[in-house]
Image (cartoon, rainbow, N blue to C red):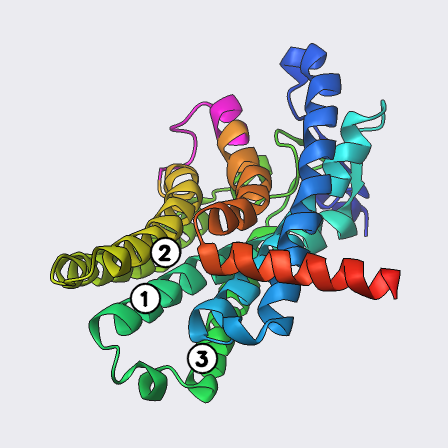
Amino acid sequence: MKHMNESFPEDFILMGFTKYSRLDLPLFFALLISYTLTPLGNIAIILVSQLDSQLQSPMYFFLTNLSFLDLCFATTTVPQMLFNLGGSNKNITYIGCRVQAYVFHWLGCTECVLLGIMALDRYVAVCKPLRSSVIMDHKHCQQLSSSAWLIGLANSLLQSTLTVQLPLCGNQELDHLFCELPGLIKMACTDTTINEVTLAVVATFLIMGPLSMILVSYSCIAQAVFRIPSADRRLKAFNTCSSHLLVVSLFYGPGIYVYMQPSGDSPQDLTKALTLFYCVITPMANPFIYTLRNKDVKGALRRFLRSAILSKRI
């Protein structure tokens, strides 16, 4: 029992940006604003996609999934970061850390796969418009969405379980803002080669697989868009696809840097900043990216607000 207590402490100390303690207060308010906007934007996307009859296509079904995923993604980490930044207590319980690591990794892997599926949906809609309703019917969309969630869960159970079993020898200081697998692996007091290789191999598969599908899909889409005779239809297709590509860039760019490098090869402060980017900024930005560049969503939001105002007057 003594060995277990030394290997697995009751609490972890999240070091955060301890070398830059003056950042705590500005970062607290930045996260607070971000976390206020994240639920507003994502819940708005979910509501209009579900309630507006003009947004009942596969694209908005997957967008609803992405918004729900981003809402969960931010909620998994930001409240704990706000708690730690807002006071002198930088701790997180061992159980809480384990749960956070499992859920965060599950959601991150799911989003990787889901973004690839969304690119496939755009390919079908643009390149095979006559068969799109058959290829991407509601049943197939549900199956694809469920597959993304299950793949993410299976990978999280594998990777997180391997990581949380590593002995820590009483080490309580986690040089990160929250409990993420690369940071937990660095805390171990034993050889972590197997964990690092497994994480890198699976991350390569889960990142590069969907990313390859995205690149191939958009190569075909670009060829199809340039063949569209109508300038308005070309512009609409371009705006829809460019929104998805921007979301992909915001999520995959930092993720590739953090997960596909050998452990210890990158500055830890840069890793923390990039992790903040894809777990805080991206979930906040995604709804606004899709709203600002999509006339259908903006129209649906206007109709939703108009009906809400009219119902209050009545």
Q: Is residue 154 left or right of residue 13?
A: left
Mark 2 falls on what kind of element? Answer: helix
Q: Callout 3: few (<14), some (14-19), or many (20+) C-alpha neighbours within 10 Å?
A: many
Q: Say which mark, if any, is on residue 209.
A: none
| Left or right of residue 211, residue 287 in this image | right
What is the distance, in whole Å, between disc 2 and disc 1 at their CAs? Answer: 9 Å
Find residue 189 and report its image quarter.
top right
Q: Secondary structure at mark 1?
A: helix
Left or right of 180 in this view: 138 = left
Q: The disc labelled 2 sits on which kind of residue?
A: Thr
Mark 2 or mark 3, earlier in chain:
3
Element class at badge 3? helix
For residue 71, say whether it is visible: yes
Instruction: Note whether 144 is above or below 222 in the view shown.
Output: below
Q: Position of residue 153 (x, y in %)?
A: 55, 68
Residue mark closest to the camera, 2 vs 3: 2
Residue type marked 1: Arg
Question: In the picture, residue 114 is in which quadrant?
Answer: bottom left
- Residue 177 image-quadrant placement: top right
Q: Which residue is mark 1?
A: 122
Q: Is residue 171 visible?
A: no
The image shows residue 158, relative to residue 9, as above or below, that is below
Seen from the viewer's position, the closer of residues 175 and 275 is: 275
Residue under label 2, please give it: 240
- In the image, what residue occupies the spot 82% across and 66% down? 311
The residue indicated by pointer 3 is: 141
Residue type at mark 3 is Cys
Q: Which residues are magenta?
A: 261-272
